Every structure is written in structure tokens, then in C-alpha cells.
Amino acid sequence: MSVIIINPNSTASMTEAMLDQARRSVPDLQFEGWTSHSGPPAIQGAEDGKAATQPLLDLVRQASEAQADGIIIGCFDDTALEDAAKLANCPLIGIGQASYHYAALRNWRFSVVTTLSVSVPIIESNIERYGFAPLVSCVRASEVPVLALEEDPKCASLAIAKEALRAEQEDNISALILGCAGMVQVVDAVKDTIDIEAIDPVACAAKCFRWMI
């Protein structure tokens, strides 16, 4: 069985980080990582999402033609998820979508800590469209750019962990969702900072395929 993680941005190191996390999370499944080299370097807001869409859909077609057993869209914005699902001939899930379902299955009220404020409306819209608005307390921006997660993970970890702690203290929640694929680099720092559950969306998406295929 082979699950392909498609990174809609062109930063190959982020693809590798997601791939490593998926393999650690579900070592008995085979994962591949594909990078959208025609996409923007990072997806931060609607304009980047629009630029990433067609190259992403081309890769979804290729993955389907390659007879993948499953596809993960490796962007927390769930870029082009509905169009991608229509093209795929196998189970397909977004990492944002997976994390919200995981929290809902545990009946956890949650907040999200993402990167920049420009991503907040997209995430809020996705949560509402999926039907999970009653479970979300707040979508927070750490104001850490996506690429800073790669370039300065120590500084990024401190800022994101600080915002996660603020969410735990203020939002009346049982879980905190890390709202960016690149945050696989800071999962441990956040878990060491807060007492509530810290949800890594890449691990959630990978674990879904234990049951989906």
C-alpha cells in the first residue's frame, strides 16, 4: 500500500519533514512525498492557494494514474481539497480536515494556532464548511511566516509555543491543533509547553489511512 503526500508548495524540505513525520506515525504503511515544484514557496492566504491549485490538481491526477492507495494534501488550508477529491480514484484527505475530525471524534473543544493572520479566514471557513464550528474556540495567528519554520525553527518554536500556551489559558479548550504542515518541526516544543493535547495534522492524516485502505 502506498500513500502519496502531495505538498502544494515548492519547498522540498517541507515535503521531507512531512514524509518523515508520516513514517514515524504509521511505520507499517508506505509513504511517498511529492513536491509541487510549480507552486509558490509557501501558501499564505488565498492568493497563494489560488496559485497552487492547478499544479496540485495535476499531481493528484498523476497520483491516481500511478494507482496510489491514498493521497494526503499536505497543506493545512486544505488547498483545492474538494476539486482534488473529485479527481482522485482513491481516498484523499487534507491535513486540516484530518485534524478537525480527530478532535471531533474525541469530543474535544479546540483552538488552532497557525502562521500568519492572512490564513485565519481560510481556516475558519474550512472549519465551518466541514461542520465543526461548534467545537472551535479560536483560530490564532502566531505571526510566524511559513518559511521561518524551516529557516529558524528555534525562534519559530518559541513564538508558536507562546501562542499555544495563551490558547490553553484563555480559550477553554481540551486540544490545540497546529495549523501548518511545516509545524511538524515544532510539535515537541508545543507538547512540552502545554498540558492539553497538541494535535499534529500530518500525523492525524497519516493515521487515517490505517482504516481508510
Image: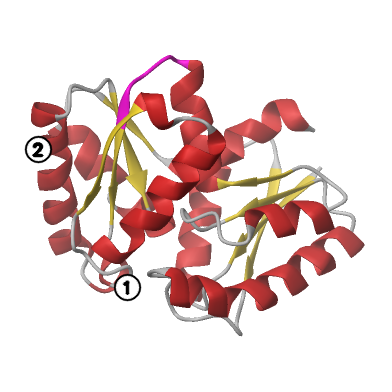
Query: What residue lies at 45% left-to-right and 77% top-to-bottom?
Result: 47
Residue receiving disc 2: 166
Q: CA distance from mark 1 to mark 2?
A: 23 Å
Sort mark 2 into few (<14), some (14-19) or many (20+) by Cα contacts within 10 Å. Answer: few
Query: What residue lies at 43% left-to-right and 55% top-to-bottom?
Result: 181
Query: What residue lies at 46% left-to-right and 76% top-to-bottom?
Result: 48
In terms of sequence position, does the residue under pointer 1 or pointer 2 come before the other?
Answer: 1
Say which amino acid is labelled 2: Arg
Residue receiving disc 1: 147
The circle drawn on residue 34 is: none
Whether 150 is among the magenta residues is no
Percent x, y of residue 12: 51, 74
Asked which quadrant contains residue 53, the reply is bottom right
Task: Tell me if residue 173 comes above or below residue 65 in the rendering.
Answer: above
| SS of the residue under disc 2 | helix
Q: Nearer the viewer, residue 157 or 123?
A: 123
Say which amino acid is labelled 1: Leu
Give the main secondary structure, helix, strand or loop, of the magenta stretch.
loop
Percent x, y of residue 39: 56, 80
**One can see residue 24 in this view:** no
**One can see residue 114 in this view:** yes
Magenta residues, start to end = 106-110
Sort mark 1 into few (<14), some (14-19) or many (20+) by Cα contacts within 10 Å. Answer: some
Q: Nearer the viewer, residue 4 or 42?
A: 42
Task: Name the side, left or right, on which 80 lies relative to 63.
Answer: left
